[in-house]
Image: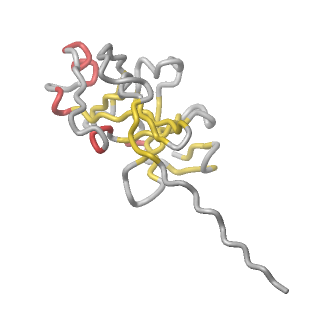
C-alpha cells in the first residue's frame, strides 16, 4: 500500500503492518489506521503516521529506553481489546515532543500495541509520577558554523 505523508512524500507500507486503533488517539478519534515508519538505522525514534490523513504523524519511542522503571497498568478489558493474554505481551510507545532543548515523552498517554494482532490503544493514566511532558533526553546544542574569510 502506498500512503501520502506530509513529511516523507509517498511511502510504501506493507498492508500487513498497518496498526488499528479502534478508539483512535486522544483528540483524533476518527483516525484509526497508522503505520510505524523508521527513518534511520538507529531504531530509537519512529514516526507513527496516519494512513488516512497525510498531515497527521507523531514521533514515538519506547519509553523504557529513557525511563527504565516505567510500567503501564493495563486493565483486563484493554488486554481483551488488544487480544493479549498478559501485559507482558504488550509493546509500549509514547508520543515524543520537542520542548526547547529537550525531548519529552507523554508518559500519561502511552500507546499499547499487540504486535501479534497489530491492534493498539492509547491509555490515559492517572499516575502522578509521570506527565505529558516527561523529560527524556537533552538535545545537543547546535554548533555555530565556522566562517571562512577570503581576501
In which quadrant of the rendered image does the C terminus lie? bottom right
Left or right position of 123 against 132: left
The way the protein has been coloured in the rendering is secondary structure
Q: Work out which residue is located at the far bottom of the displayed protein and give it.
A: 151
Q: Which residue is rendered at x = 32% and y = 38% of the image?
A: 63
Relative image position of residue 120 (x, y in whole percent): 35, 27
- Identify the image quadrant of residue 147: bottom right
Relative image position of residue 131 (x, y in whole percent): 39, 23
Q: Which residue is rendered at x = 33% and y = 40% of the image?
A: 62
Residue sitting nearer the eye, 70 or 13: 70
Left or right position of 115 against 20: left
- Above or below residue 56? Residue 142 is below
Q: Which residue is rendered at x = 37% and y = 22% of the image?
A: 108
Residue sitting nearer the eye, 45 or 117: 45
- Above or below residue 83? Residue 58 is below
Residue sitting nearer the eye, 51 or 132: 132
Q: Which residue is rendered at x = 47% and y = 19% of the image?
A: 26
Q: Work out which residue is located at the far right of the displayed protein and give it.
A: 151
Relative image position of residue 36 (x, y in whole percent): 43, 43
Residue sitting nearer the eye, 106 or 32: 106
Left or right position of 10 against 65: right
Count numbered badges in the picture.
0
Relative image position of residue 31 (x, y in whole percent): 52, 24
Amino acid at each position: 500500500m502506498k500512503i501520502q505523508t506530509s513529511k516523507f512524500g509517498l511511502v510504501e507500507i506493507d498492508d500487513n503492518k498497518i496498526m488499528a486503533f479502534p478508539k483512535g488517539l486522544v483528540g483524533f478519534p476518527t483516525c484509526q489506521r497508522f503505520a510505524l515508519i523508521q527513518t534511520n538505522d538507529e531504531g530509537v525514534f519512529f514516526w507513527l503516521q496516519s494512513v488516512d490523513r497525510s498531515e497527521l504523524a507523531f514521533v514515538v519511542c519506547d519509553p523504557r529506553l529513557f525511563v527504565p522503571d516505567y510500567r503501564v497498568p493495563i486493565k483486563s478489558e484493554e488486554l481483551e481489546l488488544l487480544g493479549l493474554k498478559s501485559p507482558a505481551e504488550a509493546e509500549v510507545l509514547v508520543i515524543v515532543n520537542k520542548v526547547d532543548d529537550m525531548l519529552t515523552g507523554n508518559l500519561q498517554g502511552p500507546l499499547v500495541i499487540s504486535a501479534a494482532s497489530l491492534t493498539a490503544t492509547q491509555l490515559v493514566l492517572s499516575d502522578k509520577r509521570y506527565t505529558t511532558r516527561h523529560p527524556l533526553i537533552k538535545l545537543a546544542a547546535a554548533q555555530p558554523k565556522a566562517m571562512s574569510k577570503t581576501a
